Amino acid sequence: MKYAILTVSVLIAGQAVAGSVDVGVENFTHSNGVAKAVLKVSNSLGKPASNIFVDCAFLNGEKKAIDVGSALIEKIANNEYAYDTASIVTKSDVQYVDCRVSKFD
């Protein structure tokens, strides 16, 4: 079974910052009714980032959302990264995952 992984770089609109908080999907699995994405979140803001919320839409073959899983990373120092996971329980055939940083302090 083939899976496609969508990687997204996000800069929260309206914030005047020198860099961004980026999220990439390092690995994606779907087995035994659980779809899971391993996330790498990087901070290039020029300052520490905290309370980083990541939302991941798990999509079917037509790229329609099945469900959303979330991750929360408490703190990432400037020019550093952290790993976390987002997952859902589903019997649907998940083919893609699309993740975005939804909020950070």
Image (cartoon, rainbow, N blue to C red):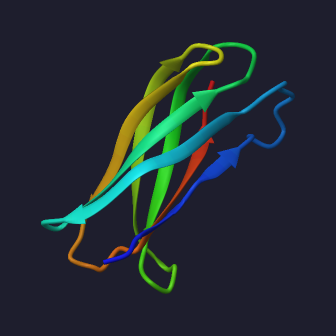
46 relative to 13, above or below: above
| Residue at screen point 70% across, 13% down | 47
12 relative to 65, above or below: above
| Residue at screen point 63% across, 52% down | 8
The image position of residue 71, as x and y in percent, is 41, 41
Q: Name the side, left or right, on which 29 lies relative to 80.
A: left
The image position of residue 104, as x and y in percent, is 61, 30
The N terminus sits in image quarter: bottom left
| Residue at screen point 84% across, 24% down | 18
The C terminus sits in image quarter: top right
Number of dots carrying numbers: 0
Front position in the image: 4 or 37: 4
The image position of residue 5, as x and y in percent, is 49, 62
**Snapshot quadrant of residue 58:** bottom left
Residue lying furthest left in this view? Answer: 32
**Snapshot quadrant of residue 7:** bottom right
Residue lying furthest bottom in this view? Answer: 62
| Residue at screen point 37% across, 75% down | 2
55 relative to 58, above or below: above
Q: Name the side, left or right, on which 46 lies relative to 40.
A: right
